Amino acid sequence: MTGDRQQDTSKNPGGKTDTDARVVTSRRRVLAAAALTPVLTAAGTTGAAGTPRTATANGHGERIEPVRTTPADWADVARVLGRPGNMLRDMAYHTGFPRRDLLVVSGGVVVTPGLALGTHVAFVRYADGSTMLMGDVVVTEKELQQVTDAWQAHGIEQTALHKHLLSQTPDLWWTHLHAHGHDAVALARGLRAGLDRTATPPARPPRPQAPIDLDTAAMDAALGARGTADDGIYKILFVRRETVVDGHLVLPPGLGSTSAFNFQPLGGGRAALSGDCAMLADEVPHVLKALRRGGIELVELHNHHLAESPRLFFTHFWAVGDGVALARALRPAVDATDVVPNV
C-alpha cells in the first residue's frame, strides 16, 4: 500500500497526494452539478405551449387516471386537424392521416396505406384536466427535418425515430410524438403545424370495405384472436396485460402498448405482413428468435416512450407468404409476450 501511494504521489504536480486529487475532483463534480441544476430543472418542468408537466421522467408522483370523453369533447381539436376522429375505449380520441399521396414499394410489394402508411394520433384527457398527445407519424426523408423543426417550435417532443419497412422507396421514416398540457387545442395546432410541412392529403369520404382475399377464419384460429377488416387489410391486435404509466400518467389500455399484425392481401391467399410486437426487456430475445424461426424478417427494435413503466420495447417485422402460414409463424412470438387479444 505504501509503495502504491508513493507512486501515485509522484504523478501529481506539486507533490499532491492522490487523496488531495480526489478531493479536488469531487469539488469540481459538485460545482458542475450545481451549474447544471437550473438547466435540467427548466428542461423537465415545461411541456407543449409552456404548460407545466404533471408527469416526471422517473415516474415518481401520484398516478393520474384518464377520464372518459366523447367525440363532442374533441370538436375543437377536430376542427384544427381538419378531419373527424373516433373514440378508442371511450378514452382516447384517435385520428388517422393515411399517406395516400405516396406510391411505396418494399420487397417488390406495392404497400397500401392501410398496411404501413397510416399516421395515427391520439388525445387523452386526464382527471387533473390536462391532455396528453401521442402519435406515430409517417414522413418522407425530405420532409423529416422541417417537420421536426415545426414540432419543436411548438413544444412537441419526439420519442422515437425509426423504420417500419425494409428497402422501401421512397425513403420513409416513422416518428413518435408526445406532448402534455392543459390546452388541447394548442396541442392540436402544434401537431398540425408539423403535418402541414408534409404532403399528407386531405381526408376522403369513407368507402365500402372490399372483401379480404384471405382465409381469415383460419388466421384467427392460428393466432387465437379475432381480427378486423379495415382499409383493405386484415388486422389482428393484442394489448399488454400490464397497466402502463408514462411518468405518472396512466395510459388507457392498448395506447402505445399494442402488438399489431397487419395483412395485405396479394391474391391466392397470399399476404404481405407488416407489424410490431410490444415487449418487456426479458421478452425481446424470445420474440426475435421466434420471428426468425418463422422466416419473418426483422426491421427495427426501438422504444415508443421515454418515461414509461414498465419499460417497453417494440420490434417491427416484414414477411410475404400464405396468410395462414404467416399467422402460424407469428403465434410463438405472441405466446412469448404477456398480451391478450384486443376487444
Image (cartoon, helix red, strand yellow):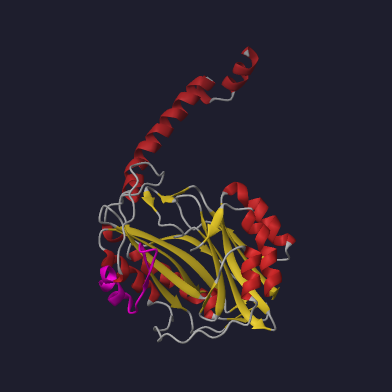
Position in image of residue 234 (x %, y %): 57, 75
Q: Quadrant of residue 104?
A: bottom right
**Residue 84 on the magenta span:** yes
Quadrant that contains the N terminus: top right
Q: Nearer the viewer, residue 24 or 276?
A: 276
Q: Nearer the viewer, residue 279 or 69?
A: 69
Looking at the picture, does residue 143 appear above or below residue 314? below
Position in image of residue 197 (x %, y %): 40, 77
Q: Residue at x 36, y 60 (%)?
A: 179
Q: Nearer the viewer, residue 141 or 258?
A: 258
The range drawn in magenta is: 72-93
Position in image of residue 305 (x %, y %): 46, 55
Q: Nearer the viewer, residue 40 or 325?
A: 325
Q: Residue at x 64, y 66 (%)?
A: 221
**Residue 23 visible in the shown view:** yes
Position in image of residue 211 (x %, y %): 57, 84
**Residue 16 visible in the shown view:** no
Q: Quadrant of residue 26?
A: top left
**Residue 136 on the magenta span:** no
Q: Is residue 319 left or right of residue 341?
A: right
Looking at the picture, does residue 127 appear above or below residue 142? above
Q: Residue at x 69, y 65 (%)?
A: 328
